[in-house]
Image: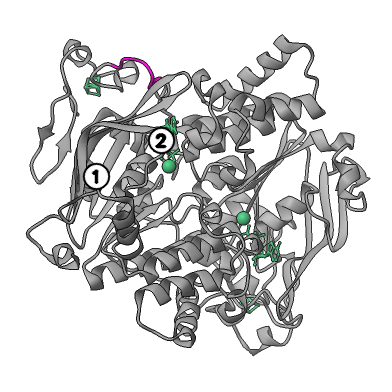
Amino acid sequence: MSAAVMTESVPLLTVEDLVLDFRTRSGMVHVLDGISLTLDRGEILGIVGESGSGKSVLAYAMMGLLDPAAQIPRGGIRFAGRDMLTESERSLAETRGREIAMIFQSPRTALNPIRRVGAQVQDVLLRHANVSKKEARKRAIAALARVRIPDPERRFDAYPFELSGGLCQRVMIAMAMACNPYLLIADEPTTGLDVTTQAVVMDLIREQVRSSNASVVLITHDLALAGEYCDRIAVMHAGHIVEIGGTEAMLSAPKHPYTARLIGATPGGHESIRDLASIPGSLPDLRRDLPPCRFIDRCERRLDCCATDALPSVNLGADHIVRCWNPL
Amino acid sequence: MTTAIMEAVRLVKRYPTGGGMLHAVDAVDLAIQPGESVGLVGESGCGKSTLVRLLGRLIEPTEGAIVFEGQDIAPLPLRRFVHDKARGRIQVVFQDPTESLNPSLTVFDTVADPIRRLGNPGGRQSLAAQVRKAIALVGLPPEMETRLPHQLSGGQRARVGIARAIALRPSLLILDEPTSALDVSVQAVILRLLADLRSELGMSYLFVSHDLNVVRLLCSRIVVMYLGKVVEEGPTEAMFRQPRHPYTRALLASIPDPARRGHTPWRLEGSASSPIDPSPTVCRFYGRCPRQEDRCAETMPELRAVGSDGVHRAACHFAEEISA
Ligand SMILES: Nc1ncnc2c1ncn2[C@@H]1O[C@H](COP(=O)(O)OP(=O)(O)OP(=O)(O)O)[C@@H](O)[C@H]1O
Ligand SMILES: Nc1ncnc2c1ncn2[C@@H]1O[C@H](COP(=O)(O)OP(=O)(O)OP(=O)(O)O)[C@@H](O)[C@H]1O
Ligand code: SF4
Ligand code: SF4
Ligand SMILES: [Mg+2]
Ligand SMILES: [Mg+2]
């Protein structure tokens, strides 16, 4: 099947009109609505957006990891042509280990708490490369060194609770990279890292991707980081992708009102906290019947049709798509 | 000169690990004045969260004093401190909200719990009002009250952690990376909330963050740590305008910038030296420092005043020569 992963004729990943709801005691929560995107080989796609807008849930869905309370009434996800939503759990587990790797938003809880961190990296290498235990240990230490963990020979034996948040994050990154995946899904991979370490780790991820023609989905709140490393950026708001396009166009000339507000709220060069824009209002209650545009209550560009007509997909050229009746 | 609300004196935390002693926090002095907001930054793994846990008395210091509102709380055994009245006056927002929330408590009960134990819950209605207020202040919609942690996004969990800490209206709020899981708009809400709480209640903050732009907005003073030690501290603007320690300089130079896309800018070479049994006579930054000389491997630089204001201090032999 690796053959299919390599074939250029099928896109590496496609998400098509995906709808996802969660059952809760207080009703259905409509978390993803009509999500569509295509990921090419060798591409770094950034996903940014409001807290709670569905970025992590989408990432989990791409991995075929779904909460038992999740329901998918519509849509599909294909990885190298295979349907991730109907694939058997066994074959999914296989794919996850070999072809898709994920860096989770909360790294310490994603690591095995009672196994030494070096051994956890070593385990991945033993599964993936046909090497001796001794060689795998050597490579694991080198992998820890590459993510700038000081004194990797001795830190090899540390347990997750003995590491700082950022050190755990880097162990997780080392494990994900050790798989040499075709697709790396990184959910806020560097939130625990200072900017100097972040730069080194992001360079490393980019290098590996470029050299093996792999792809990355980078979920981040840091627009500057997305701007520096991503080829394309998708902006999510309340379960919709409201805008997607090439990084430069998105950041310099955003078209969706939400994207523009998001960029405006980024600190940097602001005089004071008072000057910092935020976006009035909050995420709508996702249990209700929602209007076609979920940003409507917070939008000063709304038109009458925004409340009634299904959202358009406006292609502005160069695959810059905005879902809005009155884009900037 | 006001007296500090919190003062750490020669604070030390070491952990025995395989093959030696890990120096997580190494003779740190730190004072926070009432109503002051201090930013703590530094390389991942340099000891920030350990310092946070020491000041919040969640772990035992190896050596040193922690003076909170005039009382040395360092010698109090952890079990006693849990019931000490100081406990409610220092609140900590933890770095990883997923780890620090009880998975079986709803959002409401998570926020209510410290009010019940350490605050003034009053009757059922008074408690509910306090909880709802805290939840609303952090920008969480009311329908989240009945959710369990696993039903929340990362940023929603982080806000529950903040709501829990501010609900008690502590005099010192210690926040460990409180906004790293938040989008910039929600982050703006939280930063404004923190600024308001400070001006209304005179709350003091220790604010740990990797986001230097955020620290610059919120904090009047910055403390920079490197491998267990404070290497520079001073007023925020002075630190940005004229960093005196080579590490601080490197940190400021690495703030991500979309204008650099596709180019690999200058990077700090090598990784930090080991936190396990570091040499007491070698500068902690030696081996990575672009400015280093032989002297740096022979004498550990002490933190000392640089410049004329007396409050900007750096631990580098050549601090006077370093400029942005
Ligand atoms: N099991 C669940 N039951 C009900 N709602 C859920 C469940 N899991 C997630 N949600 C809701 O789904 C929405 C999307 O969550 P998700 O974790 O994908 O957000 P996110 O975009 O990753 O946000 P963040 O940036 O804060 O991590 C949130 O509003 C969250 O409250
Ligand atoms: N319980 C422990 N046992 C042994 N070592 C520990 C323990 N807790 C922390 N350490 C070590 O102490 C050092 C400082 O960790 P700390 O969590 O304070 O770093 P940090 O500055 O908060 O880093 P980050 O920015 O990555 O969160 C690290 O080397 C860490 O591995
Ligand atoms: S569709 Fe209408 S309401 Fe929605 S963002 Fe566009 S202009 Fe605003
Ligand atoms: S003392 Fe020497 S090694 Fe240390 S920071 Fe200064 S120049 Fe660099
Ligand atoms: Mg998330
Ligand atoms: Mg930490």
Q: In this picture, is B189 found above or below B158?
A: above
Among the 4 quarters of the image, the one containing residue A263: top left
Residue wearing tag 1: A86
> Which residues fall within the magenta stretch?
A284-290
Give the amino acid at mark 2.
Ala
> Would residue B84 be counted in the magenta stretch?
no
Q: CA distance from mark 1 to mark 2?
A: 40 Å
Residue drawn at x 47%, y 18% as measured from the top left: A26
Helix or strand or loop: what does disc 2 sit on? loop
Q: Main secondary structure of the magenta part?
A: loop
Helix or strand or loop: what does disc 1 sit on? loop
Q: Tell me: is circle 2 under 8 Å from ligand 1.
A: no
Other residues around mark 2 within 10 Å, as few (<14) / some (14–19) / many (≥20):
many
* Numbered mark located on residue A69 in the image: none
Among the 4 quarters of the image, the one containing residue A162: bottom right
Chain letter behind tag 2: A
Residue wearing tag 2: A265
Q: In this picture, is B269 found above or below A189?
A: below
Q: Residue A222 in the image: x percent, y percent?
A: 40, 47
Residue drawn at x 40%, y 71% as measured from the top left: B266
Relative to residue A197, is residue A300 drawn left or right?
Answer: left
**Looking at the image, which is closer to me, B271 or B268?**
B271
> Would residue A288 be counted in the magenta stretch?
yes
Q: Looking at the rendering, in which quadrant would you find the N terminus of chain A?
A: bottom left
In this view, the mark in front (1 or 2): 1
Q: Quadrant location of ligand 3? A: top left
Give the amino acid at mark 1.
Thr
Is any part of residue B27 visible from this angle? Answer: yes
Among the 4 quarters of the image, the one containing residue B281: bottom right
Q: In this picture, is B270 found above or below A101?
A: below
Q: Residue A12 in the image: x percent, y percent?
A: 18, 56
